[in-house]
Image: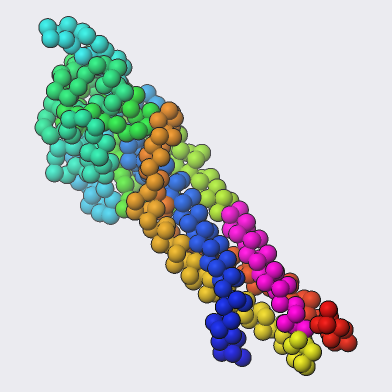
């Protein structure tokens, strides 16, 4: 019977074409939307992790207690040795020492007098050494709009809004005025190598990118760093991060020593402690709502497909076919229709999700005025669940709708069949 029903589906395109197209479209939209939601929320986390938070972050106990103040006088010492140990113990992770500090940026005129100045946030990363991962990971070069990226010691990159406010351009010299790790005043001259446009107001407003060794020289932080950021290979996983922090703190942690290192996961850091726990829940809620909506559409499609065939059911019953057999064949047909449409829709959905994941959609024009650090390129993120999630609305809803429509078969009275057919 199964072979007979499959042959009927393929030969009678009027009966199978529209249901399969509807199921394919619904499943495709379900998968694309699910991948889009995962990508949107995941990229927001990844952007903040790469620039400021890391998947995990190592600091001293004292630094962590005053983390909002960026207290570099409580920085980690002996960073090179610690990073080497981390790379040995966590070979699957990448490690990046960072220094962040607030400074007054002064732009002198031709005779050395102050022409303009403003407060800046300096972000020091390892851009020039062979071990540095930051330039490639952040993709800084693609954001350069004038000049070039840092090529040698003494060069910096300035964000475009900040550069406009200071009226500076590549090749100009600026003076960074800050505080050393020991509390003394620090004055350091840098040459602007390029201007960078991140497309996010929170970064473009006052950011200065500095090489790590230059920042250490300026702030008397020899082999020191305010933070060491750790990154997994791929998207952030809160369970893996918590497991890693538990192991590290068990080995290196000492609550009684304010300069002992402590590792915190992204989900434990102040600005993300609330966001990370609910991110997975909201992903599930939003995806479930869309799956439910698609399920209702496909349920209705299955219901209508069954209703349109009431005349066929009447003829089959009038010819002596049992009601149970008619109902069973109708359900089996809907299963085949759902499977064919789901497989096709899954393939198309994964294809379009892959395109969105690889190339993305540029919506930087919508993020220029926001105070949040949001990605300029919207990308999808394909997860293992995208390979089977379409079967929920594609097969389940279609079969359910058909089963409800087929209930009328048992309500048909054989004595009235010829009268119905005549009408």
Q: Quadrant of residue 4?
A: bottom right
| Residue 258 can be seen, yes or no | no
- The foreground one among 130 and 259 is 130
Q: Quadrant of residue 189?
A: top left
- Residue 422: image x %, image y %? 83, 82
Up the image or down, 294 lies above or below 178; here it is: below
Quadrant position of the N terminus in the picture: bottom right
Query: Could you tell me which residue is drawn at 37 percent across and 56 percent down?
Result: 355
- Residue 389: image x %, image y %? 52, 64
Look at the image and name its color scheme: rainbow
**Secondary structure of the magenta portion, mostly?**
helix
The magenta-colored residue range is 289-314
Query: Could you tell me which residue is drawn at 62 percent across and 77 percent down?
Result: 15
Q: Quadrant of residue 17?
A: bottom right
- The foreground one among 61 and 53 is 53
- The foreground one among 313 and 159 is 313
Query: Could you tell me which residue is drawn at 25 percent across and 11 percent down?
Result: 116
Up the image or down, 247 lies above or below 206; here it is: below
Residue extending furthest toward the front: 422
Residue extending furthest toward the right: 415
Q: Is 339 inside the magenta-drawn segment? A: no
- Residue 234: image x %, image y %? 34, 53
Query: Could you tell me which residue is drawn at 53 percent across and 59 percent down?
Result: 30
| Residue 305 can be seen, yes or no | yes
- The foreground one among 422 and 190 is 422
- Residue 133: image x %, image y %? 22, 44
Q: Is 310 inside the magenta-drawn segment? A: yes
Quadrant position of the C terminus in the picture: bottom right
Horizontal side of residue 336 vs 82, given as left or right:
right
Horizontal side of residue 160 vs 343, given as left or right:
left
Up the image or down, 193 lies above or below 132; here it is: above
């Amino acid at each position: 019977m199964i072979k007979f029903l499959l042959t009927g589906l393929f030969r009678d395109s009027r009966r199978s074409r529209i249901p399969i197209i509807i199921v394919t479209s619904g499943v495709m939209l379900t998968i694309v939307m699910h991948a889009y939601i995962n990508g949107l929320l995941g990229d927001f986390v990844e952007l903040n992790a790469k620039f400021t938070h890391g998947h995990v972050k190592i600091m001293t106990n004292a630094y962590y207690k005053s983390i909002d103040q960026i207290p570099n006088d409580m920085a980690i010492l002996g960073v090179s040795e610690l990073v080497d140990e981390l790379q040995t113990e966590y070979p699957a992770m990448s490690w990046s020492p960072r220094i962040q500090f607030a400074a007054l940026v002064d732009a002198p005129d031709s005779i050395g007098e102050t022409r303009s100045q403003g407060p800046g946030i300096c972000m020091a990363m390892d851009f020039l050494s062979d071990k540095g991962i930051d330039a490639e990971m952040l993709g800084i070069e693609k954001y350069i709009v004038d000049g070039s990226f840092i090529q040698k010691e003494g060069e910096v990159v300035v964000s475009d809004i900040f550069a406009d406010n200071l009226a500076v351009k590549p090749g100009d010299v600026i003076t960074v005025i800050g505080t050393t790790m020991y509390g003394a005043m620090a004055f350091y001259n840098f040459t602007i190598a390029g201007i960078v446009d991140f497309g996010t107001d929170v970064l473009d407003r006052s950011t200065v990118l500095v090489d790590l060794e230059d920042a250490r020289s300026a702030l008397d932080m020899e082999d020191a760093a305010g933070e060491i950021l750790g990154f997994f290979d791929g998207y952030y996983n809160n369970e893996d991060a918590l497991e890693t922090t538990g192991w590290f703190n068990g080995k290196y942690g000492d609550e009684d020593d304010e300069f002992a290192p402590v590792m915190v996961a992204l989900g434990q850091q102040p600005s993300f402690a609330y966001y990370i726990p609910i991110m997975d829940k909201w992903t599930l809620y939003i995806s479930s709502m869309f799956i439910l909506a698609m399920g209702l559409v496909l349920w209705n499609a299955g219901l209508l497909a069954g209703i349109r065939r009431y005349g066929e059911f009447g003829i089959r019953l009038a010819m002596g076919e049992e009601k149970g057999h008619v109902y069973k064949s109708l359900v089996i047909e809907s299963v085949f229709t759902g499977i064919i449409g789901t497989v096709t829709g899954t393939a198309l959905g994964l294809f379009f999700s892959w395109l969105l994941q690889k190339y993305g959609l540029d919506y930087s024009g919508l993020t220029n005025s926001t105070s949040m650090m949001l990605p300029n390129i919207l990308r999808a993120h394909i997860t293992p669940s995208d390979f089977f999630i379409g079967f929920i609305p594609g097969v389940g809803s279609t079969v359910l709708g058909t089963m409800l429509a087929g209930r009328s078969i048992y309500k048909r009275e054989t004595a009235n069949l010829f009268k119905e057919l005549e009408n």
